[in-house]
Image (spheres, rainbow, N blue to C red):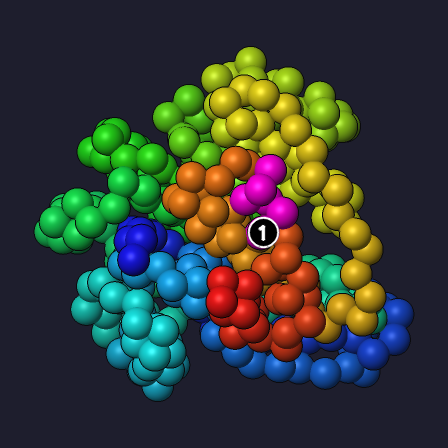
């Protein structure tokens, strides 16, 4: 069984979807669902569903929601490594979707992630010996991210950018990242370029020493770099979308799974695309149906 170490957040997701065209600055009739989520948690669960053994460094509080989080991760046979936390609420995320189930706005409260210190990681350094890969998101403070890159130079570090508000925390380490995954908006923030196309952004990443990159563009094709070589994977339009939350996480999980098993980036992205399709039709941020892809 392939083993992998992951560092990042997990949340309680509140997903609100408008029944009709979303009208700003007023209440809209719609539906609200509550589920477990968080980018790195979603990636963990997807990888576990594919048969990989995951060691997950995160922050989980001691309240009822914390118990739900732990129980769910344990159910998926994920080893959870969290500092003892009593004085913070568990991370929560609220997303407002339009009537097409596409995200309009979102807010996350993840102050609890400040409790995941570099000292805690070092106290569990033996865990990092279990995998040649280290997957992380940008929920950590910039100083903690710097420390990780300095301490674990022997690892293939995979980074999920997460959001425009956090992506610049990795700016000093672009050459050190084994694989960076971001969407076009996060890429534009990282490169301080709000107008260029995906193709031009790829060239800019190459000039900065980024060797491997996954650049998603919403419903458009996925662009990528593999050892500085550019490529593209087309995306088919999906019908009857239930929820877009977690689709990018499923995509990256599928890519990690295939890369860890020595597939090309093109093959890995196509597999991740199939996982994302299944997630689009799930009310939750992950889909148990991805297990069927590896039977």
At which x and y percent is residue 18?
79, 75
Q: Is residue 40 left or right of residue 77?
A: right
Image position of 182 with respect to 58: above or below: above
At which x and y percent is residue 140?
36, 47
Element at label 1: helix
Between 127 and 101, the residue placed more toward the observer is: 127
Between 277 and 7, the residue placed more toward the observer is: 277
Image position of 150 with respect to 237: above or below: above
Residue 267 belongs to magenta span:
yes
Residue 234 belongs to magenta span:
no
Q: Which residues are magenta?
A: 266-272
The total number of labels drawn is 1
Q: In which image quadrant can residue 29 be found?
A: bottom right
Residue under pointer 1: 271
At which x and y percent is residue 109?
47, 63
Q: Is residue 37 left or right of residue 94?
A: left
Residue depicted at x 63% and y 24%:
230
Residue depicted at x 63% and y 47%:
270
Magenta segment main secondary structure = helix
Image position of 216 with respect to 11: above or below: above
Assign the N terminus to one quadrant of the image. bottom left
Would you say residue 73 is visible in this rendering? yes
At which x and y percent is residue 27?
78, 78
Q: Is residue 82 left or right of residue 91?
A: left
Residue depicted at x 52% and y 74%:
288
Which residue of the protein is positioned furthest toward the right in this rendering? 21
Image position of 193 with respect to 37: above or below: above
Between 149 and 271, the residue placed more toward the observer is: 271
Would you say residue 167 is visible in this rendering? no
């Amino acid at each position: 069984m392939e083993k992998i170490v992951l560092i990042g957040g997990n949340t309680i997701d509140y997903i609100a979807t408008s029944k009709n065209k979303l009208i700003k600055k007023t209440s809209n009739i719609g539906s609200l669902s509550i589920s477990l989520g968080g980018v790195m948690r979603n990636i963990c669960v997807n990888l576990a569903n594919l048969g990989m053994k995951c060691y997950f460094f995160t922050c989980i509080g001691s309240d009822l929601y914390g118990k739900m989080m732990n129980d769910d991760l344990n159910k998926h046979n994920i080893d959870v490594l969290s500092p003892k936390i009593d004085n913070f609420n568990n991370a929560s995320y609220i997303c407002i979707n339009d009537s097409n189930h596409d995200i309009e706005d979102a807010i996350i409260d993840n102050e609890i992630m400040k409790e995941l210190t570099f000292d805690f990681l070092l106290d569990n350094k033996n865990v990092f010996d279990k995998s040649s890969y280290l997957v992380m998101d940008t929920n950590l403070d910039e100083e903690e991210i710097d420390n990780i890159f300095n301490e674990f130079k022997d690892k293939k570090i995979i980074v999920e950018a997460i959001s425009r508000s956090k992506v610049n925390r990795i700016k000093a380490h672009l050459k050190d990242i084994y694989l960076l995954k971001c969407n076009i908006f996060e890429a534009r923030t990282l490169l301080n370029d709000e107008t260029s196309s995906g193709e031009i952004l790829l060239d800019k990443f190459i000039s900065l020493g980024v060797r491997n990159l996954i650049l998603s563009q919403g419903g458009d094709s996925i662009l990528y770099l593999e050892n500085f070589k550019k490529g593209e994977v087309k995306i088919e339009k999906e019908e009857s979308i239930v929820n877009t939350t977690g689709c990018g996480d499923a995509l990256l999980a599928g890519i990690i799974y295939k890369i860890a098993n020595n597939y090309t980036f093109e093959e890995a992205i196509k597999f991740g695309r199939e996982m994302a399709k299944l997630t689009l039709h799930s009310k939750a941020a992950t889909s148990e149906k991805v297990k069927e892809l590896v039977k």
